[in-house]
Amino acid sequence: MSGFVKGGGTRRADAQRNRERILQAARDLVHEPGELKLNAVAKACGIGQGTLYRHFPTREDLLAEVYRREVEDLVAAAPRLLETQQPPDALAAWFDRVAAYARVKRDVFAAIESPA
């Protein structure tokens, strides 16, 4: 069964929750030593491997989405921080986000380079 509603093109709520859980688990696990294994991601978020593969057919697809999401979050953080903090404080907080992004980027690229 697809993660989309028939004819509507929108992702079902449970499918969207599963996708978010998969991405969070992958983001957490990518920091651990060794290669990122898809069965470990599925186990970490309590779903079957079939569910994971419906969302991300390959390990590279999953890692690319983790990386894309990190870039998207980093870009979106700047205006949100400026809404709630003075510019110098917002800049400092954004640099903290840049450092976190750099760690994820390093780990995602290391995972891509390790054999599956």
Image: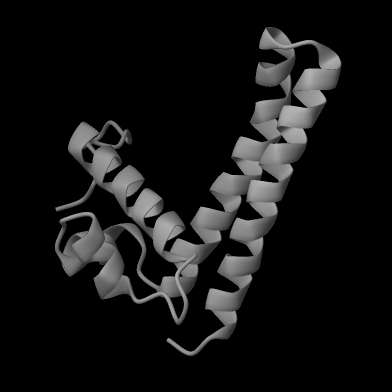
Quarter of the view holding residue 73: top right
Q: In this view, does 4 lie to the left or right of 111?
A: left
Work out whether residue 16 or residue 39 is closer to the camera in this orientation and state it: 39
Q: Residue at x 32, y 72 (%)?
A: 38
Image spot of residue 84 (x, y percent): 67, 9
Q: Which residue is drawn at 70% across and 39% down?
A: 96
Q: In this view, does 7 lie to the left or right of 73?
A: left
Image spot of residue 50 (x, y percent): 18, 66
Q: In this view, does 59 lie to the left or right of 55?
A: right
| Position of 18 relative to 39 (above/below) | above
- Numbered disc total: 0
Quadrant occupied by the C terminus: bottom left
Work out whether residue 55 or residue 79 is closer to the camera in this orientation and state it: 79
Q: Residue at x 76, y 21 (%)?
A: 90
What is the residue that sits farthest to the right in this orientation? 88
Q: Which residue is drawn at 59% across and 83% down?
A: 113
| Position of 111 relative to 75 (above/below) | below
Quarter of the view holding residue 82: top right
User: Which colour scheme appears in the figure?
Assistant: one colour
Image spot of residue 89 (x, y percent): 78, 20
| Position of 3 relative to 56 (above/below) | above
Quarter of the view holding residue 28: bottom left
